Amino acid sequence: MKPKSQTLQGHYAGFITRLFAFIIDVIIILVMLAVVSYALSLLTRFFWVLPDLITNLFGTSKEMLIDGYKSALPAITSTVNVVLIIGYFVFFWMSSGQTLGKALMGVRIVSVTGRPLTFAQAFLRFLLYPVSAMVFFLGFVWILIDNQRQGWHDTLARTYVIY
């Protein structure tokens, strides 16, 4: 008789696995943000190449239009970046319980009831990441101590990370 193979499926995910998943997610997000920044810079060039068309449409001077867009670009880029970062985590946590990094590491997030995360749980969990990072990242280090491998953000959002 063959011995049963040992599997981690259903067990709580540990600190190192979660850390590598997060690092993968950060790399993916940085690539996304670079693409968005490049796209917005192309949009800027579009406004500089066609200022006559835009000034005819809006009746403003070229310089005023270009200056206004240049001053608004950092706010636009920042807003788009924040929406992308929050959207990345919240969307994946709600839809499959896994970001791309977590999927590559073979872990997923579930509610303490075993169900998929609601929008409120996913959003709260995201907002609590900085809380876990405060005071020397103790909220993340807590994963090493807790029997259910929950960080502070997991405990407060009522989630588990499992294999």
Image (cartoon, helix red, strand yellow):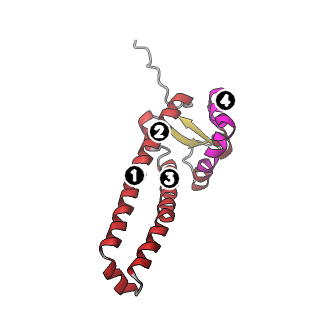
* Upstream in sequence: badge 1 or badge 3: 1
Rendered position, 28 above or below 67: above
Residue nearest the observer in this picture, 73 or 33: 73
Question: Is 15 contained in the magenta span?
Answer: no
Q: Secondary structure at mark 3?
A: helix
- Tell which tag, 2 or 3, sits nearer the viewer: 3
Q: Give x and y (percent) for residue 141.
A: 63, 31
Compared with 4, 137 (above or below) is below
For residue 57, what is the image quadrant? bottom left
Q: How far is the residue under mark 4 from the one under mark 2?
A: 20 Å
Q: CA distance from mark 2 to mark 1?
A: 22 Å
- Decide if residue 102 is in sight here: yes
Secondary structure mostly taken by the magenta-highlighted segment of the chain: helix
Label 2 – label 3 distance at C-alpha: 16 Å
* 10 Å crowding of disc 2: few (<14), some (14-19), many (20+): many
Disc 4 or disc 3, which is closer to the eye? 3
Tag nearer the camera, 1 or 4? 1
Residue picked out by circle 1:
34
In the image, what residue type sits under mark 2? Lys
- Can residue 14 be seen from the camera position used here? no
